[in-house]
């Protein structure tokens, strides 16, 4: 299973991926050129009899600054055959969001699990945090998504047992369940295959 991180430049994708996969702060983040892939081990249904470890590939596609056509062509190299849940470009499989405006009813039946992550919580002035958190709460409600706001320079924001860690674990479980459902729908013969371990 893999997850891709949106391609906007300078939003903290590399710091987020490093924190998620290495459980430590990325000391000196730089621009990602092309695509960087990191792996996270995740326990599906942690704490239940069905618990099973699996790997998640996190693709950090470098943000591109330039013309819309160059951004689109760069992204296409890495997003080939990927179903984007939110897409500013017109897409038969994506929900269209343009100029920050969207129709919230488009998200009501969206089967793709979504998680909104703010990566630079530490850079929001104390006086503005309440306003920003209120705005992101409304946005996550519209998208039918969980939300997490992080300071990617502080690993405590994803420490075990925190609400952020719980939301992240639930999100990865939803993604895993969704991926398994899709495989079983497309390949019914997979029901006959049993795991080796």
Image: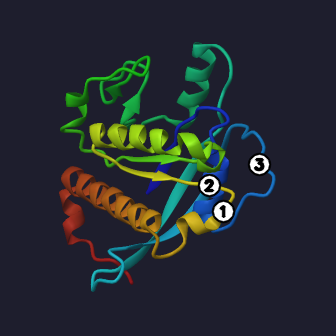
User: Which of the pair 147/90 is nearer the observer?
Assistant: 147
User: Which of the pair 147/16 is nearer the observer?
Assistant: 147
Q: Is residue 148 above or below residue 7?
A: below
Residue at 32 percent across and 23 percent down: it is: 102
Mark carried by residue 151: 2
Residue at 65 percent across and 58 percent down: it is: 18
Q: Looking at the rendering, which quadrant does residue 151 occupy?
A: bottom right
List x then y, in percent, for residue 134: 40, 42
Distance (Cα) linking label 1 and label 3: 14 Å
Picture mark count = 3
List x then y, in percent, for residue 43: 42, 75
Q: Quarter holding the N terminus?
A: bottom left
Determine contact: label 2, label 1, CB under 8 Å. yes
Residue at numbered disc 1: 154
- In this view, the residue farthest toward the right is 28
User: Which of the pair 80/158 is nearer the observer?
Assistant: 158
Q: Residues within 10 Å of mark 2 (few under 14, many from 20)?
A: many
User: Which of the pair 186/32 is nearer the observer?
Assistant: 32
């Amino acid at each position: 299973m893999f997850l891709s991180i949106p391609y906007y430049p300078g939003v903290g994708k590399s710091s987020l991926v490093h924190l998620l996969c290495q459980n430590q702060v990325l000391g000196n983040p730089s621009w990602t050129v092309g695509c960087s892939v990191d792996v996270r081990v995740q326990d599906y249904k942690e704490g239940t009899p069905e618990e099973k470890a699996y790997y998640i590939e996190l693709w950090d596609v470098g943000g591109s600054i330039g013309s819309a056509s160059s951004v689109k062509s760069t992204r296409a190299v890495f997003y080939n055959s990927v179903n984007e849940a939110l897409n500013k470009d017109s897409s038969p499989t994506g929900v269209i969001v343009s100029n920050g405006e969207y129709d919230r009813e488009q998200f009501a039946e969206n089967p793709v699990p979504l998680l909104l992550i703010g990566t630079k919580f530490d850079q929001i002035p104390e006086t503005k945090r309440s306003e920003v958190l209120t705005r992101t709460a409304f946005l996550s409600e519209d998208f039918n998504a969980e939300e997490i706001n992080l300071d990617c320079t502080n690993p405590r924001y994803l420490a075990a047992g925190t609400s952020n860690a719980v939301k992240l674990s639930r999100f990865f479980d939803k993604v895993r369940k969704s991926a398994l459902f899709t495989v079983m729908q497309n390949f019914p013969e997979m029901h006959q295959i049993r795991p080796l371990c």
